[in-house]
Amino acid sequence: MFDFLDNVNISSFIALVIRLIGLVVVGFYLFPKQLKEVLRPVDWLTELRWQILALLSVSVVSGIPSIWYQIIRLNGGEAEILRNISTVTSNVSQLLIIILLVLIFNYKKKS
């Protein structure tokens, strides 16, 4: 049933699927929803909405090297520079998620 997996690096395949699912969720679900929020009338949450949109944008862009690297690794290829870039951008993406959560949970209404 899964004969194509015989010649494929399974860990790279799983990492690619997970990364693609995450990218699709952020890029095609969260980003459009946040874009709608940014276009709402200006109120006390407008600044936070823009910050969330910016962090989502950077998160999507920072996921691209990781996807590209996993595609190369599927058939046993190796790209050291891309691996290093992927490692850094993955950590940047994780850091952005942490920053996003801190922003959301600590945002206060300005008087």
Image: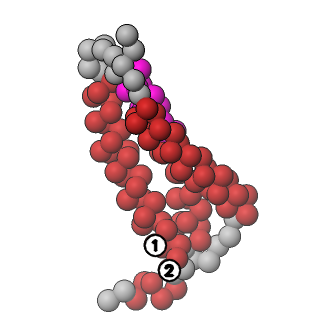
Coloration of the structure image: secondary structure
Query: In what element is the residue under mark 1?
Result: helix
Decide: marks 1, 2 in contact (CB < 8 A)? Answer: yes
Amino acid, disc 2: Ile
Q: CA distance from mark 1 to mark 2?
A: 6 Å
Which range is magenta?
Answer: 46-59
| Residue that numbered label 1 is attached to | 14
* Percent position of residue 44, x then y: 33, 16
Label placed on residue 10: 2
Q: Residues within 10 Å of mark 1 (few under 14, many from 20)?
A: few
Q: Quadrant of the C terminus?
A: top left
The residue under label 1 is which amino acid type?
Answer: Ile
Residue at x 69%, y 64% (from the top left corner): 79
**Main SS category, magenta section:** helix
Is 48 part of what is drawn in magenta? Answer: yes
85 vs 37: above or below: below
* Residue at 45% from the left image edge and 28% from the top image edge: 51
Q: Is residue 62 visible?
A: no
The percent coordinates of residue 61 (x first, y second) are 52, 43
Q: In the image, what residue occupies the spot 50% across and 45% down? A: 98
**Is residue 79 or residue 25 the one in the foreground?**
25
Looking at the image, residue 49 sits to the left or right of residue 80; the answer is left
Residue that appears at 68% across and 70% down: 78
- The disc at residue 76 is none
Q: Residues within 10 Å of mark 2 (few under 14, many from 20)?
A: some
